């Protein structure tokens, strides 16, 4: 009877599975020490440490048009906006370093940054 897999085949399969799992680890483990910056009119108006948020809350950004931001632990998102196209709301939750959402009519931008000094290191996308 023929053997289906040789020892070398099993080692190759295990190596490929471990290499594939290693590609997903930075995304799973990379949510620590996140900081959200909210810009209004080009100036930073809110600096929020998302890792220290215990209870979700809402921030109302004066417009015009006015928009509402929901802050959660390790996430931030536009909850609602009075702008016509609502692309900022459709951007969804920002949960990873480098995520950005903007409401151009309101001249507001939200950016997620890492609090540690490793922001200059390349991430998995640019590497």
Image: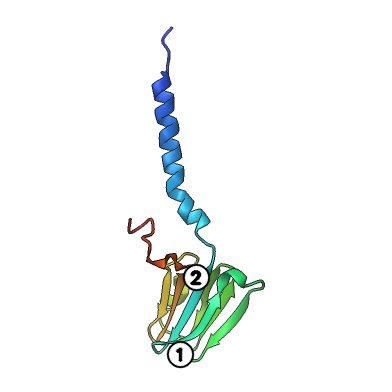
Residue situated in front as seen by the camera: 94 or 82:
94
Q: Which element type, helix, strand or loop, lies under badge 1?
A: loop
Q: Is residue 69 above or below residue 5?
A: below
Q: Residues within 10 Å of mark 1 (few under 14, many from 20)?
A: some
Q: CA distance from mark 1 to mark 2?
A: 30 Å
- Residue appearing at x 66%, y 71% in the figure: 54
Decide which of tag 1 and tag 2 comes sooner along the chain: 1
Query: In the image, residue 89 lies at what x, y percent?
Result: 47, 75
Judge from the rendering whether residue 126 lies leftward or rightward of residue 108; answer left or right. left
Residues 97 and 61: in front is 97
Of 42 and 121, which appears nearest the observer?
121
Q: Secondary structure at mark 2?
A: loop
Q: Specify the quadrant that holds the N terminus.
A: top left
Residue 65 tag number: 1
- Residue drawn at (43%, 13%), measured in percent from left and top? 3
Image coordinates for residue 69, horizontal then vertical, percent: 53, 79
Return the residue at label 2: 115
Q: Measuring 45% from the left and 38% from the top, which residue is drawn there? A: 18
Residue drawn 62% across the image and 78% down it: 57
Q: Quadrant of residue 9?
A: top left
Residue 100 vs residue 36, the one in the foreground: 36
How many labels were placed on the picture?
Answer: 2
């Amino acid at each position: 009877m023929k053997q289906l897999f040789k020892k070398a085949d099993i080692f190759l399969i295990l190596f490929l599975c471990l290499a594939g799992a290693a590609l997903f680890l930075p995304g799973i483990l990379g949510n620590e020490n996140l900081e959200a910056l909210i810009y209004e009119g080009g100036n930073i108006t809110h600096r929020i440490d998302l890792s220290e948020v215990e209870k979700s809350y809402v921030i109302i950004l004066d417009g015009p048009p006015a928009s509402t931001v929901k802050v959660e632990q390790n996430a931030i998102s536009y909850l609602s906006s009075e702008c016509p196209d609502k692309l900022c709301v459709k951007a969804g939750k920002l949960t990873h370093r480098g995520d950005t959402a903007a409401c151009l009519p309101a001249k507001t931008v939200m950016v997620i940054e890492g609090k540690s000094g490793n922001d200059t290191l390349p991430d998995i996308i640019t590497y």
